[in-house]
Image (cartoon, grey):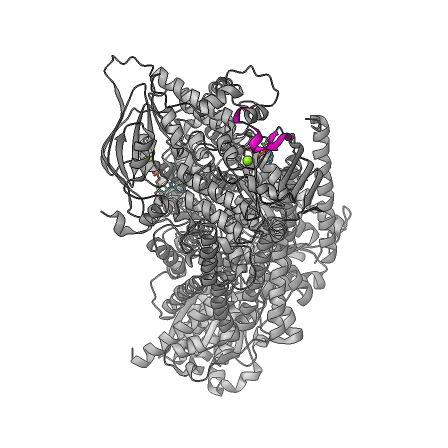
Amino acid sequence: GGGDKDRPADGAAPKLRVALLTPGPISDKSWNGSAYEGLLRLRDSLGAEVSHIQTKTPAEFEENFRQYGAQNYRLVFGHGFEFQDAASRVAPSYPNTIYVVTSGRVTGQNLAGVAFLFEEASYQAGMIAGSATRTNKLGLIAGTELPPVKASFEAFTRGAKSVNPKVEVITSYVGNWDDVSAGKEQALAQLARGVDVIFQNADAAGLGVFQAVKEKKALAFGTNANQNAIAPDVILGSVVIDLPKAFMLIGREVQSGAFQGRVIHLGIKDDVVRLELNDALADRISAATRAAVDSVGAELKAGTFRALADMIGRDSATTPATAPAAPSKP
Amino acid sequence: MSTTEVMDIGGAFLESTVRTATPLALAALGECVSERAGVINIGLEGSIIAGALGGTVAAGVVGVGGGFVAGALAGMAIAALFAWFAVGMRADQIITGTAITLFALGLTGTLYRSVFGDAGVALSTPTAGELAVPGLSQIPLIGQAFFSQPAMTYIAMLIAVVLGWWMRHTHAGLALRATGEYPDAAVAAGIAPRRVQALAVLFAGAMAGLAGATLVLAQAGTFVEGMSAGRGFIAIAIVVLGRWQPLGVAAAALLFGAANSLQTLFQAMGWAGVPYQLFLALPYVLTLLVLAGASGRTAAPAALGKRD
Amino acid sequence: MMGRGETAQSETTLLSLERLSRRFGDVQALDDASLRVRAGTVHALLGENGAGKTTLMRLVFGLLTPDGGTMLWRGASLRVRSPAHALSMGIGMVHQHFTLVPAMTVAENVALGGHGRFDREAAAARVREVGARAGLSLDPSARVDSLPVGAQQRCEIVKALARDVQLLILDEPTAVLAPSEARELLAWVRRFADAGNAVVLITHKLRDALAVADDVTVLHRGRSVLTMRAADTTEAHLANAMLGERTIAAPGDVDAETVVAAEHAAPALDDTAVAPTQAPETVLSLREVTWRDARGVVRVQRANMSVYRGEIVGVAAVEGAGQHELLRLLSGRLTPEQGTVVRPADVGFVPEDRHRDALLLDAPLFENVALRGAGLRGGRLDWAYFRRAADELISRFDVRATGAAAPARALSGGNQQKFVLGRELSGEPPALVVENPSRGLDFKATLAVQQALRAARDRGTAVVMYSSDLDEVLMLADRVYAMHAGLVNEVIPDRDAVGRAMLGTLADDAPESLGDTDRTPAGSSA
Amino acid sequence: MRDRTPPLRSAVLAAGQVAVLLVVALLLLAALLAATGHAVGPALTALVRGAFGSWYAITSATVVRMVPLGFAGLAVALAFRAGVLNVGAEGQLLMGAAAATALALPLQHTSPWLAIPGMIVGGALAGGVWASVAGVLRLRFGVLEVISTIMLNFVALNLTGWLVRGPLQEPQHINPQSSSLPVSLQLPVLLDGTRLHAGVPLLLVTAAVLAWWLFNTASGFRVRAVGANPRAAHSAGEIPVGRTLLLAFALSGLLAGMGGAVEYLGITYALYENFSPGYGYTAIAVALLARLHPVGVLGTALLFGALEAGANAMQRDAGVPSVVVSVVEAVLILLVVALDRWRARTASGRSGL
Ligand SMILES: Nc1ncnc2c1ncn2[C@@H]1O[C@H](COP(=O)(O)OP(=O)(O)OP(=O)(O)O)[C@@H](O)[C@H]1O
Ligand SMILES: Nc1ncnc2c1ncn2[C@@H]1O[C@H](COP(=O)(O)OP(=O)(O)OP(=O)(O)O)[C@@H](O)[C@H]1O
Ligand SMILES: [Mg+2]
Ligand SMILES: [Mg+2]
């Protein structure tokens, strides 16, 4: 979408200007695609003027952050942990711009990280997978190994073992996020080893995982966006990050002037992260499992769930997260 | 592990080998012809991605068969642009190829978004089913791998055999080889080297387009921006590995497919502790070792990459 | 000597070229060139290097289009669109530089340009049949790059004949051949013409032209300056025509009389310049030197050889006898696996293929001067020095070039050769090794090169010289070594003695037999 | 001689051709943008503004991008001059960055005057070693470097992926990246408020030194001679061809590795998996368009840097997605190529065989 070129006259209430930097193409139906949806939501609901850029390399992160700062954008999202260092370097130079790094843990006056508690719903997905498997073998496939991916795989494994201690988990990495055929081959290799449920987090390459699962009539979980419709006959459910909702929460906070630099935790409690089951396959999940999953959900909402306490930093939210970043420099 | 389990894993490994090798073989066989005419086409990657998109769009309208044809035509269209510069204008083949790849990756992304919207399509493309050869597909271990594959796999095998024959047993094949070895000799014998080169490049484009269409219509069932993922470059390496002989190229594609399947197999064996990147690097290291082991100077066409 | 009288029976004009012109950038290669080729005749086309001979024939073969003038083929207007078109009309051409694909077999090369299925057997049969008809024997399944040059030349001709041509253009076909091979080829040319066909023969050897041709045309600076029956002219007359009516003052220039005299000169035994009383000082020597190629074939076997200060040592051999390797061992361009080579640090070397082995074609001349000895130099290069050196070389050796900055490619073949020779002599090296120094040069350039070699010898340089033209070896050399199948022996500089030594025990089909030896490991591992 | 054009007239003629091609390029771009539903005017304005529109754009977007492209371009130019088809600048650059990263820890307590050059030298050596692998494969085993360097690029990419999750990962072991370089070890910024770092003058000096070495020293001449005609270099120049080729491989890798180290020290301050967006591949076009001249490389690297910078602005300010931008870049490269060929052809009307 094109940016609105009209500049508000001096003194008039400035229009909210929001920018988004994604590390990959917005046509991936997943991580980047839903962030772009969030940006459009801000445009449509809050009347914001928006801009998007797909960055290719860390060298471009800082440059684009600075460009948006210099153009007085009010809110700039860096979509992924990899934007942390650049954001913390740039933020002090542009105090009027708020930098938000999703999956990040950096904070500052005008800098926030958003920790999506993706683990919570991943745990629930693991419970369902653990009870749905007939072979007791579960597969995990990702593009490359990233912190949120690792955490959610760990939570998924714990959830599966909580209902079925016999399950064995196999992890494979495609090596990139857009080679669909390679994603499919990784899935087929796992399926040949007896895996019958696969939880994938591989963006576009994940489509290949679904294709393999479809062909071999196994089961799968979607991630990031609600991917249930992509292969309704094999996808049990999706672990969704409702990025539009998250963006709206942050956008409203910024608009209202209540923004504070911190790590913003968003999870099941906030209805930003949730497990969305595929109704078409509802019969594949036993009532008992469903009840167990729901009760975990309730505990997560209440903040009483302990099984992920060591992984999820919501309790430590008060202590500012230490960024690996160095002191910033203009 | 039980014997049946070993057989299962072995069978799956071979199946995966052949599947992975098919698009690589198609693209590499085309490139083999183009290089035999003295043209190295780094823009192959561009033809592959164009073939993937062309196949996707057409398959939705006219079905899978039409998709393959459209894929070949799309790959050829990109190759025509390359030929215009690299053969017609005698521009540097490497710069031109680099630009063509960039062009095709961008153009396919742009067209894909304008046809299917920013959100794209996913897994809605019809795909070609497997075609089991009666009897042969029942052979233990290798039956499924070699005789129960999408038709494109058999076509690739057939093309390798036919090309091998064609290069040695037709005058057109001789003309192709002469052009890549010594264009002046071709001219003296009444052959028009530029026409030969242009045709060879177009053929390579069509084959790369087929490879791209195969990725979508026989494997992934979907188009994704950048899904060619470097296969064009691998195909160029495979041509060298196969020593510019069609059957050698097919064998080299299988070897590369095997190395890649080994990588997926190792990961699926759950060998925790070994960094997965080492597995991912395996096919490339293996290729280097094979090249070094097959010592002795490889016989590249003498005029490969030369401008005049 | 060969029934030239009989050809008068046919007066049909096969090819007629009228007032053709063609220019390349600033060079007017053809200005007003005319030529008339009668059926049943051999037509010699003569002219100095750069006169336009090749260009004229390339117009006929469809490789170039004329800027002006008319061409007639069998009386009808001729517009040749491409070599394929020329071939289809019965015009074939054997080029000055081979146009064979080295990596393909003889049969494949001969079949090149056909249509439809390629049948290896049929193609081989065709080679044998055409070869038998023409008296040119060839192994159809041999790879061209394994053949000695003589066989490659035969392959070129068979390739043209297999297309059933009536007019065959031969551009300097004997330049690369040993004398016996050249004689065979010319005899065949005569027979081919006598059968009702026609041949245009481009050559620098006036004697050959007069011996075999019916008609002669001389080109000078793109113009036909003389056309007549060969029977009515003499070498001196032709040489005069080739030199044109220029008045010449440059030191390298000569007149026709000298040229003809030089070509017929007896071996110069009397003009050794270094005082014979001095004990000879050995400059280059080989002791029991053996060298094998990459395939393990012995090319030089236990060679012993000495070259003294102030002499020219000739090497006589047929192609493929190992002289190529011998010269490189002497000049230090190859390292022997066995035996010792004694040589000074600086040995000048003039290889036969100057394009491939001596020049950076796209680099300016002064960089080509700097190339000599580049492997031994360090630090900064003083380009001003090399520019001066190039200028000096250009004037001293009469190299026709626009200046020190001209790229080597811009020079004609003869001038490239003079430049290379001059460069190798410029450091006044104690030793100089030259290989076929006058290949493809016109008589004037040949003479200049020969003079330069003698002058070097007279200054005290130890010169080793190989030429595929035995007469040239005998004319220049003080002593002669003959080489056969890797074995080196000194022989008395007498035509018969040398001829026998270089052919070894083998009979007249020597080149082909040597080719076979190359390909048979059994024959060479001895 | 008669149709030799006077210099002034031919200069005007050449300028005219360039102008015509530029107009063609702009029309093509306009058509492309219009066809994909973008406002043409704002998009092209953004392209120019992003590259040259402000002091920040020039120093921090355009010139900064020129640095890795320039070093990799020099690497490719040097190799191609020697007849070595090094397509592996990408992997060599990554290895250079990785080595510099690895040296950051041991060197961080020494003086920056020691540490910064130390990291650059270390990066350069790593790149040199990586390229030498291809050199040895070629000279010992006859493996064509076009293939081996492509393979080594993939290996380097995976190696980097492992390093940032293994030995070089930041101390908290969360993110797949190295820890950020302390300010004291970063390449100094030359102009406050910009990203113009000391790597820029370093590139200029390197190009000048390389040009001087190639064209004025005996060893540079040997490299060029071997590239121009290895047989003549051996036979007429008595140049050790194998050793000279190996030198070319190593020096080429050295330059690319240096580029990686400088990019790390001056821009990214950390090693990432996707450290390079393909600088090593673009560098091939950079070098060839510069006709393999080191000083020309500076010009073409600047051109490509400006293109990328402008392309970013087109995305940000005119909403032209990056996929369209790469088409625009490709069209511009092809036009430059066409112009180049047109010039070459009008310069010499030669015909073949
Ligand atoms: N393709 C070309 N481009 C530029 N100049 C050319 C070209 N071909 C020939 N010439 C020039 O045209 C002139 C005639 O060349 P040509 O090859 O016809 O001479 P030639 O008589 O065959 O000489 P030689 O005896 O050396 O073979 C020479 O000055 C040569 O440099
Ligand atoms: N023209 C060439 N083209 C490509 N590679 C070559 C060429 N010439 C030589 N080489 C490679 O270099 C290797 C060594 O070449 P050469 O014989 O020149 O050795 P060198 O460098 O002189 O060795 P040394 O330094 O030990 O004397 C050869 O085996 C070959 O692999
Ligand atoms: Mg000639
Ligand atoms: Mg040596």
**In this rendering, position of residue C21 left or right of residue B208:** right
Where is residue B305 drawn, in percent x and y? 52, 48
Establish if A241 lies above or below C169: below
Where is residue C124 drawn, in percent x and y? 45, 59
Confirm whether residue C227 shows in the render. yes
Q: Is residue D292 magenta?
A: no
Quarter assignment of residue A253: bottom right
Q: Viewer-proximal residue, A110 or B66? A: B66
**In this rendering, position of residue C482 left or right of residue C24:** left
| Ligand 4 image position (quadrant) | top left
Q: Viewer-proximal residue, B177 or D16? A: B177
Confirm whether residue D353 shows in the render. no
Where is residue C222 drawn, in percent x and y? 63, 31
Region in magenta: C216-236
Where is residue C516 drawn, in percent x and y? 33, 50
Q: Viewer-proximal residue, C48 or A238? A: C48
